[in-house]
Amino acid sequence: MLIRTERLGKTYATGWFNKTYVSAVNNVDLTIRQGETIGVLGESGSGKSTLGLMLAGLLKPSRGKIYYEDEPVGYPFKGKIRRDIQILFQHPEISFNPKLVLGKSLNEVYKLYDIPAEGNVVEEHIRNFGLYKEHLERYPHQLSGGELQRAALARILIIKPKVIVLDEPTSMLDYISQAQVIKLLNNVKQEENLAYFFITHNIKLAEIVSDRIIKIEGGEVIEERRVAMQ
């Protein structure tokens, strides 16, 4: 088992003096296997993004446990697990420094993880995502939404993670860009044997991309089912 949670929960406190406590996620038990896509359905405010942030190590749970490869995980994520679990945001621009051209942002990852990047390595890598040398010389605001999302995915895959939390990755894109990103995600999953935690409010999309679907309401998993073969 790649990821397993036990009674995972997150509570937020609101108000300065008379604090009110709101449970965003409550007692979630789930599993994610290598190469599997879990579709996560829920309305806005249901807790699905909060759950994704906890799985990605960006938000500390209030209670419960997360296990990775059968070992309990501490916060913040460090070492191998920090590299193995990544997140692709709904707004890809937050993954990039607006003052750096794309090429420099990508090279930062190679340097950070001490990955060789001699010659045309970066250019060859982004070509797999429909991006080319001219894109490396552009700033984030000079890229379209679809280009930026593909660049964000390319940036993540430099370090070869095992799990990607996908937080509404196509909801801000036009239909053509949505189709391009979904096709790319499917291809990458097959080639790299990745696991996806695919957060969405789109039932049809969840049916297309997922092996299993969970539905969250009020911070709790109210339904779980396997998707029939397409």
Image (cartoon, rainbow, N blue to C red):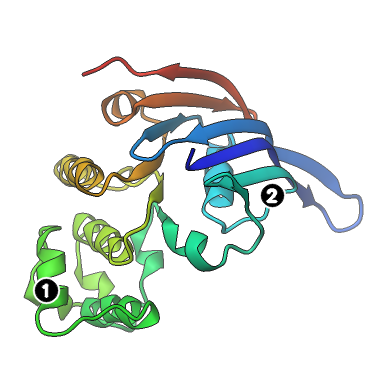
Tag 1 residue: 123
Q: Position of residue 168 (x, y in %)?
A: 39, 43
Q: Is residue 32 left or right of residue 190?
A: right
Q: Judge by depth and name the residue closer to the eye, 56 or 117.
A: 117
Q: Position of residue 47 (x, y in %)?
A: 59, 38
Q: Judge by depth and name the residue closer to the eye, 161 or 55.
A: 161
Using the image, determine if residue 218 lies above or below residue 158: above
Crowding near the residue tagged with mark 1, few <14, some 14–19, many ≥20 C-alpha atoms within 10 Å: some
Precedes in sequence: disc 1 or disc 2 = 2
Crowding near the residue tagged with mark 2, few <14, some 14–19, many ≥20 C-alpha atoms within 10 Å: many
Using the image, determine if residue 103 lies above or below residue 226: below
- Work out whether residue 31 can be spotted: yes
Three-letter code, disc 1: Glu
Say which residue appears at 21% left-offset and 79% top-offset. Answer: 103
Q: Judge by depth and name the residue closer to the eye, 35 or 41.
A: 35
Secondary structure at badge 2 equals loop
Tag 2 residue: 61
Using the image, determine if residue 210 lies above or below residue 113: above
Which quadrant of the figure has residue 114? bottom left
Q: Judge by depth and name the residue closer to the eye, 221 or 134.
A: 221
- Work out whether residue 219 can be spotted: no
Secondary structure at badge 1 equals helix
Q: Position of residue 154 (x, y in %)?
A: 24, 62
Q: Is residue 125 left or right of residue 22?
A: left
